[in-house]
Amino acid sequence: MTKGYWVAHVDVDDMEAYKSYIAANGEAFAEYGARFLVRGGDRKVQEGNARARTVVIEFPSYAQALACYESAGYQKAKALRDPVSTGDLVIIEGYDQ
């Protein structure tokens, strides 16, 4: 089964309020088997432009990655994130040799 990934680039306007989103998304991520591979951290932009924060989340399958985003639990958490951040999110199927 090919894994699925969320790759997000985010600018956070209010980190204190954003922490509510972080706390709220855990239930949906646990339900869909998500595992953080990158969650902020030091980085160097080598080419192009990037937002301040990069997050990569791995799911057991591409279908689960999509389902998590569409779930009521995640949408509830997302409603906390939207007013305090701007971002780009790609849900992508992994490469299975």
Image (cartoon, helix red, strand yellow):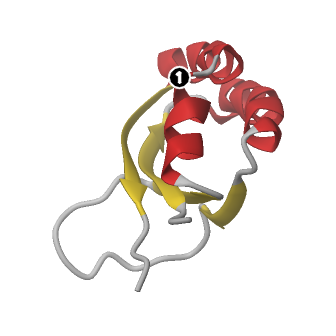
Determine whether 72 is above or below 41 in the image. Answer: above
Residue 89 horizontal/vertical position (percent): 38, 42
Q: Is residue 43 positioned above or below 6 on the image?
A: below
- At 48% from the left and 77% from the top, the residue drawn is 43
Side of 39 relative to 20 (left or right): left
What is the count of numbered marks?
A: 1
State the quadrant of the C terminus: bottom left
Name which residue lies at 38% across and 37% down.
87
Quarter of the picture containing the N terminus is: bottom right
Depth check: give the residue in front, 9 or 64.
64
- Snapshot quadrant of residue 30: top right
- The residue under label 1 is 70
Q: Quadrant of residue 41?
A: bottom right
Residue drawn at (19%, 77%) of the image: 47
Q: Quadrant of residue 78?
A: top right
Place of residue 62 in the rendered image (x, y in percent of width and height, measured from the top left): 49, 51
| Observer able to see residue 20 | yes
The x and y percentages for residue 12 are 51, 37
Residue occupying the far left of the picture: 48
Q: Residue furthest bottom?
A: 97
Q: In front here: 50 or 35?
A: 35
- Vertical placement of residue 64 versus 72, above or below: below
Other-residue count near label 1 (Cα within 10 Å), few / some / many at <14 / 14–19 / ≥20: few
* Residue depicted at x 21% and y 61%: 49
Find residue 29 and report its horizontal and vertical position in percent. 74, 40
The three-letter code of the residue at mark 1 reads Glu
